[in-house]
Amino acid sequence: MKSLVTTSSSVSPALLPSADLDVARIREDFPILKQKVHGKPLVYLDNAATSQKPQAVIDSEVELYSKYFSNVHRGVHLLSQRSTDAYEKAREKVQNFLNARSSAEIIFTRGTTEGINLVAQTYGQQHVQPGDEILISEMEHHSNIVPWQMLCAQKGAILKVIPINDEGEILLDEYEKLLSERTRLVGIVHLSNALGTVNPVQQMIEMAHQRGIPVLVDGAQAVPHIPVDVQALDCDFYVFSGHKLFGPTGIGVLYGKKELLETMPPYQGGGDMILSVSFKKTEYNVLPFRFEAGTPNIAGAIALGAAIDYVQEIGLDKIATYEDKLLAYATEAMAEIPGVRLIGTARNKASVLSFLIEGVHPHDIGTILDREGIAIRAGHHCAQPVMERFGVPATARASFAFYNTLEEVDALIAGIRKVQEVFS
Ligand SMILES: *Cc1c(COP(=O)(O)O)cnc(C)c1O
């Protein structure tokens, strides 16, 4: 991680879309990328499913377990203090990354899915009554649908859905109409994993707040690709997963405004979330510990902190600019192939290219590309309702990270032509 940025440009500008992102150097940090699959160099374009890990993230776990691992918030001994310091330092890194006001607003979870379930089963249980409404969009991931369906079933509440247009954009007029005095919460994805749409979340939050309605933003896809500032957005809850941000699996984050978190009942009961326990009365701990029952994912949190350091050193503005160029290049190349149809053509898009090839099942596309060393996803992307909206059971999806290159896009395009040859 010495010189990620380069000012000299010995490589031809065409090969280096953003002159100040040294992708060749960055790729050196990702050991997994240096391999062949089926005898071909690995082209990893499945970043929306999960992303690969830089050596710094891998090292941070090795260092913890080989040098200072112990349980957190418990011991007075040195190792426990060191682990606790590192764990809490990671929380501060997340706070800084999201620009939250306080580290007490950062709850470590297992991932996006757990963060949404936590809000549904605490804030939701507390505030939703029979006949109330929860509002989500047609392009949500299953993890921003099912927890709300479960809550609605428990409470006799109603799940309402904001429709989208043929490009995969939220219909803001319809959204406005759906905001009612019965709406208790809006749940909206920041960047759609199935379509690549970047939603106007700031505007949507403002519209909800005008009616006193809180908003949860699903940022699982957004945080690896675009800078996020929860204070600027003014969202009430923001959730993401470590593993899509070049960190480990099994760790994620729920950001919540302090004034909301403070009034919410606990999620799970157990150790660490209490101040005192007796059989008569248990006193709950302060934020953020009240929502972290049991021994947390210590290694995961610390390694997530290392992942955040890594992307911040490169700079999310630079990452976003670079990936926009990759996406534009790929979109243009795809448009030139007859028989290829893009699903999701929003004006504001990032990092995701969902597509169909006429006469070929997406799973066959995935299988043939795999033989070429190219890893993409084929399926419904945990977003079956949006597949239904476009009248398809599945798509093939290429999704980019900052370590992908224009050459890899070229390999994808060549692979798609090969698929067409096989099926012609
Ligand atoms: C991946 C993803 C989720 C779920 O994340 P998990 O890590 O599986 O909990 C939710 N929403 C979006 C948009 C995603 O891409």
Image (spheres, helix red, strand yellow):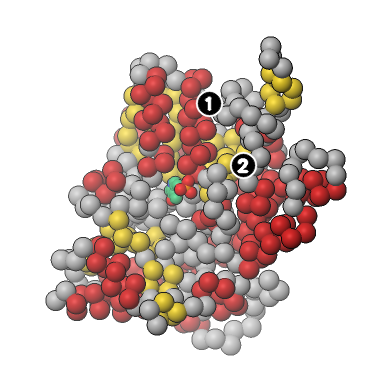
The location of residue 310, given as percent across then percent down, is 64, 63
Amino acid type of disc 1? Thr
Q: Residue furthest top?
A: 280
The location of residue 189, given as percent across then percent down, is 43, 44
Q: Residue at x 26, y 68 (%)?
A: 365
Q: Is residue 18 above or below residue 164?
A: below
The number of discs equals 2
Q: Which residue is mark 2?
A: 108
- Side of 344 relative to 143 (left or right): left
- The picture quadrant where one finds residue 256 is top right
Q: Which residue is mark 1?
A: 122
Q: Residue at x 50, y 61 (%)?
A: 51
Callout 2 crowding tier (Cα within 10 Å): few <14, some 14–19, many ≥20? many
- Side of 299 relative to 149 (left or right): right
Label 1 sits on a secondary structure element that is helix
- The answer to which of 172 and 95 lies nearer the viewer is 95
The location of residue 276, given as percent across then percent down, is 74, 22
- Side of 391 relative to 261 (left or right): left
- The answer to which of 256 and 170 lies nearer the viewer is 256
- Side of 420 relative to 143 (left or right): left
The location of residue 55, given as percent across then percent down, is 63, 68
Q: Is residue 191 above or below residue 129?
A: below
- The answer to which of 367 and 158 lies nearer the viewer is 367
- The picture quadrant where one finds residue 171 is top left
Q: Residue at x 44, y 20 (%)?
A: 128
- The answer to which of 167 and 421 lies nearer the viewer is 421
